[in-house]
Image: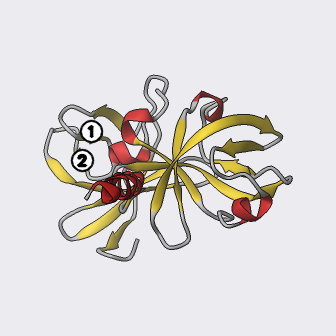
Amino acid sequence: MKSQMPEKKKQSKMIEDLVPMHDELIAIGRVIKAKGLRGELKVESLSDTEHRFELLESVFLEKKNGLIVTMTVETAKSSGNSVIVKLKDIDNRTAAEAYQGAYMYVDRKSVAPLTQDSYYIFELEGMDVLDTAGNIIGKVLRVDKYPANDVIIVGMEKEDIMIPAVKHCILSVDNQKNQMTVDIPDGLPVYPKGIL
């Protein structure tokens, strides 16, 4: 019995480090390739927050089999449009190459604070959408990025609509009530459900 105890501890620690789902995780970067011989990763930042990676103590990293592991951040430094990240336990180029294309995540509690009137997409998805009279007209299905501005896809009872994410259309967002009030411009096209 005594000889089995350390194995049990090791196994439970490994299980704790594996996160089987993405629901509570937010992608902040994607591994482009291995960098150098010491196991560093060249990461494309998906965050708008400057020095985002330098502030991290740990990240979740997706393995090729779909499982997500918790990794400690040893160093992170900006390099042009990307970030060079060194994670504990990835100590050589071969180990680093195994994560090429993988996404790096943080949990929702660890996302960087945003400026006023800025929101994370995950905060908006699923919100009730109200018109200027206070009537619920639908729910936010998703937010799509376009060159001019983001577009909020709203699912209504019989159709879907694309609302530009600009101040004169998005009048207010209430995270506490999970509601967004919109002013839909005249002539905005509507689409059959499921097309968008």
In depth, the one of 37 and 185 nearer the eye is 37
Residue 109: mark: none
Query: At 64% across and 52% down in the image, what residue appears?
Result: 147
Query: What secondary structure is marked by label 2?
Result: strand
Vertical relation: 151 (above or below) 177: below
Rendered location of residue 165, percent (x, y): 45, 44
- Label 1 is placed on what type of residue? Thr
Query: At 26% across and 39% down in the image, what residue appears?
Result: 181
Residue farthest left in this picture: 135
Q: Which residue is mark 1?
A: 181
Q: Which residue is mark 2?
A: 129
Rendered location of residue 103, percent (x, y): 57, 57
Q: Is residue 172 left or right of residue 36?
A: left
Query: At 41% across and 50% down in the image, what residue appears?
Result: 25
Residue farthest top in this picture: 116
Quadrant of the rendering where the C terminus is positioned: bottom left
Q: Earlier in the sequence, mark 1 or mark 2?
A: 2
Residue farthest right in this picture: 36
In depth, the one of 108 and 116 nearer the eye is 108
- Label 2 is placed on what type of residue? Val
